[in-house]
Image (cartoon, rainbow, N blue to C red):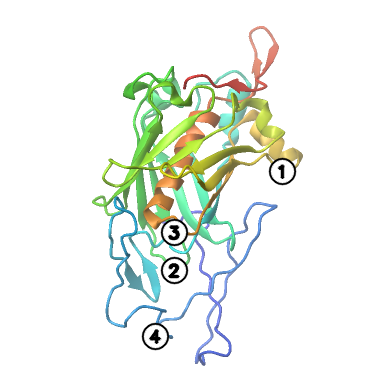
Amino acid sequence: MSYPGQQAQAQSLAGTVPVATAVPVEQAQPVPQGYVTGQQVQQPALALPLPGVVQGTAPVVQQMHPGAAVVQPSYQGGLQVGGYSFVQGRRQFLVQQHFEAIEAAANTAGCGCIEFENKYDVYDLKTGEPILFVKESSGICCRWCCKPNHTATLNAYDVRPGVPPDSLAMKIEKPFRCNCITCCDFCAHQHKTTLGDGATYVGSARKKVPCGGCFSPELELKDGNNEEITAVVKGPFCCVGGLIELCKDIRFEVNDPKTEQSIGKIIKKKPEGLKGKFKEAVGDHDTFILELANNVEDARVANMIATLLLMDYIFFEGGSPIRFNPVDQSCQCNCWNWYCCG
């Protein structure tokens, strides 16, 4: 089973090791217009040993944060797989949602209940390499009647070139939550995430309880032990979602809870060009950028990717900003959403 973005890339290492046979080269899946692209250099099997790795032994990811899990990835053909290998050495990501034309047409025509399972592609922002393909799994009745508050499981597959197909990197569980004032846990949108092995707990995130940050949305991320708060994501004042998404980037700050210093940012990008603006005006075609500091541990990076996907459901999945009512022949435009206490 193959996923979008999963294509082989290889490049001979000129001037380092002689290559006896030709290595096929394929183009990586193009990254959406306006972003930097590149190629990953993949070492052939039996080439030079990886830096800092003793041949014949498996490397161990050092525990840098009290709540971070220690995992032992493996190597296949010189490529590190498993554990947090899909984020190692990466701190900048591009996340793009797939556009569903049928869903957009139905919502624009007034059939707002029709909702397909979301799909996302995650790229390395610097190189343009595909990292993850994320697919939602949810019941149709709950999804159509209760979106975006419905119960869902997001399966994130590792689609880096050379990784075996169907390699599950993360499983993100999003339980059903009431979309009202965040007064208790049942009203606080949240996720809990494990690695693909199902045994390593990555972490969780939820809206701040009580009041969800009052007039600025706020989410708290917890570590693998679900005890210590490792990051706080804070959004803009009041205005989130609606047609305002077409005109400006929407920025969320990621802060360290102890020092209150910024350790990253999440940006909901405004669409590029008329085609992009039309898609987002009538449907869901969201694009995000995640940038984190280099000293953020791999476990927190993985948890941050899962939190970004949760934020898309909370703030940007409320329906098309432009809707046509066939009953009274009227057109409704949602300029923006007021955020107040969750």
Mark number displayed over residue 92: none
**Residue at the spot 59% in from the left edge and 69% down from the top edge:** 39
Number of marks present in the image shown = 4
Q: Earlier in the sequence, mark 1 or mark 3?
A: 3
Q: Assign a secondary structure to mark 1.
A: loop
Q: Position of residue 69 (x, y in %)?
A: 28, 55
Q: Earlier in the sequence, mark 4 or mark 3?
A: 4
Q: Assign a secondary structure to mark 3.
A: loop
Q: Which residue is mark 4?
A: 46
C-alpha gap between disc 2 and disc 4: 15 Å
Q: Callout 4 environment at 10 Å: few (<14), some (14 to 19), or many (20+)?
A: few
Of marks 2 and 3, the one in the foreground: 3
Q: Which residue is mark 3?
A: 87
Q: Callout 1 environment at 10 Å: few (<14), some (14 to 19), or many (20+)?
A: some
Q: Position of residue 92 (x, y in %)?
A: 54, 55
**Residue 15 higher or lower than 33, as above or below:** below
- At label 3, the amino acid type is Val
**Residue at the spot 53% in from the left edge and 70% down from the top edge:** 9
**Residue at the spot 44% in from the left edge and 46% down from the top edge:** 304
111 sits to left or right of 331: left
- At label 1, the amino acid type is Glu
Mark number displayed over residue 162: 2
Q: Earlier in the sequence, mark 2 or mark 4?
A: 4
**Residue 29 higher or lower than 99, as above or below:** below
Q: Callout 3 environment at 10 Å: few (<14), some (14 to 19), or many (20+)?
A: some
**Residue 146 higher or lower than 10, as above or below:** above
Of marks 2 and 4, the one in the foreground: 4
Q: Earlier in the sequence, mark 2 or mark 3?
A: 3
Furthest residue to the top? 328
